[in-house]
Amino acid sequence: MLLNKCSGRVLIFLLLWQNLPSQEIPQEMRPFVQLQRTVNIMMFKNPVFNEENNQLLRTGQLTDQKITQVPMGSGTIISPDGLILTNHHVYKMDRRIRYDNQSRQLQIIEPANRSLIVYGLEDNDPLKSPVMQFTAEPVALDEKHDTALLRIVGDAEGNSIEQISFPFVEIGDPFSLPLNSRLLILGYPSKGGKTITVSDGKFLGYYMNDQYGGLDGFIKTDAAMSSGNSGGSALHQSRLIGVPTAVTLPTLAGSDMGYIHPVTWAVKVLTIAEKKFNLDVPEIPPEWLQKDYNSDETAENIYLSGKLISAHSKEPIPAAVMVTRPDRTFDQISQLHLELQGVVVVFMFQQMYKAGAKVEDIAAYFDIPITAVRQIISRNISKQDLSSDAQQVLEGEFYYQVAQSDEDGFFVLSIPREQQLKFYGFHKGYHALTRSIRSDAGTSQHLGRLCLYRQ
């Protein structure tokens, strides 16, 4: 009798458990990839190195050299034509110099090319190690949002591939998450060995703190994450809602916490992919961006793009572009720009320092010397010394935005949504292009081909 009662309780418990919400592991695991880079490692002896200034004067004699691959992070395929969303810092790799004073040995590591190697689950088995499958090249990079969009363009050897319909993950609204709901994290952390690592955790809210502007708006989670998860996948109800990017510093007291970029931070790179390269990209509805929890510029701004060309040769022009509010003349905006150039960084650093950020943290975040940060925050500049327009800009009001078109003449810049504005295009030897525009209500707006005429 006792056994029957216990068995009944167990049965009831199991039935209740089956009804509890859970995060199912996706049946299709191939969109979750590891990204590696081919690097050139060179060893030198007897280099000339200024340790005081950390400056390499001469490399010395080359003693060894090899080409190898190193893991960079994770990524997610988000379209059938092979677009991969990841972090900018996963793609970006600067030349690395290491000098050993005792052995007088110098090591230089640098990227061998601009491509990344894509490792994936060939037979969709998450318990197996991924294999080298494809090469991917950058489509668009956004350092401000630490976002990168790559596209698969070749096989593992770099040979061009025919059109393939890749399995992909659909994106979801990162600002409709119920507090304490479950998130699923997929990626290739260095602590997890060669196989994909799947962890789940709670949605703990959004990071809102003006002490570190770069973190503002992050999704917080207690899911297990570490180095190598960067650029990977954060899923809610099987949709990609964000990109795992950072974890709390080991020096901070308390439990570890992970930070995830909302997928809406990819609007700029998706705009470039669509408007410049005519690629099919996932749609991010404007209503996602206009929710109260979105603290990013996309809450109020759209991305304006276009292409500047010479009316004479029809060739693209790398020109300067500017969008301004219509109640200021070009000369007024020019004077405002000159005034702000010398004070924006000063006020930003001083505000961060007053909010509690340490000098060392500010230096590390912006990758500048600590002495430079101390000099900047010690400068005595008062807002009362500035013009009223400059004060309003520092308070966040829109007056102007400038950008530079690339070698293809393409530009993209952030402007307020649904406003009457002025657009300017400049290039030496050409007449300035002036146009009145009204910004759209969506996420992006394309002006098409804009002609500049010779003087």
Image: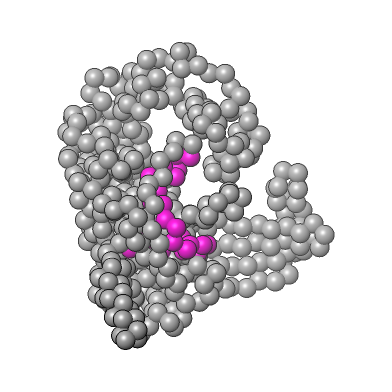
Residue beneath the point at 23% across and 29% down: 422
Q: Quadrant of residue 79?
A: bottom left
Look at the picture and state if 35 lies above or below 365.
Answer: below
Residue beneath the point at 50% across and 16% down: 382
Look at the picture and state if 70 lies above or below 247.
Answer: below
Q: Position of residue 35 (x, y in %)?
A: 45, 68
The reply to whether residue 266 is visible in this rendering is no
Observer-nearest residue: 29 or 50? 29
Residue beneath the point at 46% across and 81% down: 129
Q: Position of residue 341 (x, y in %)?
A: 46, 27
Of all residues, the one furthest to the front in this rendering is 1
Observer-nearest residue: 312 or 424? 424
Colouring method of the image? one colour
Observer-nearest residue: 148 or 201? 201
**Which span of residues is magenta-colored?**
212-235
Look at the picture and state if 393 lies above or below 59.
Answer: above
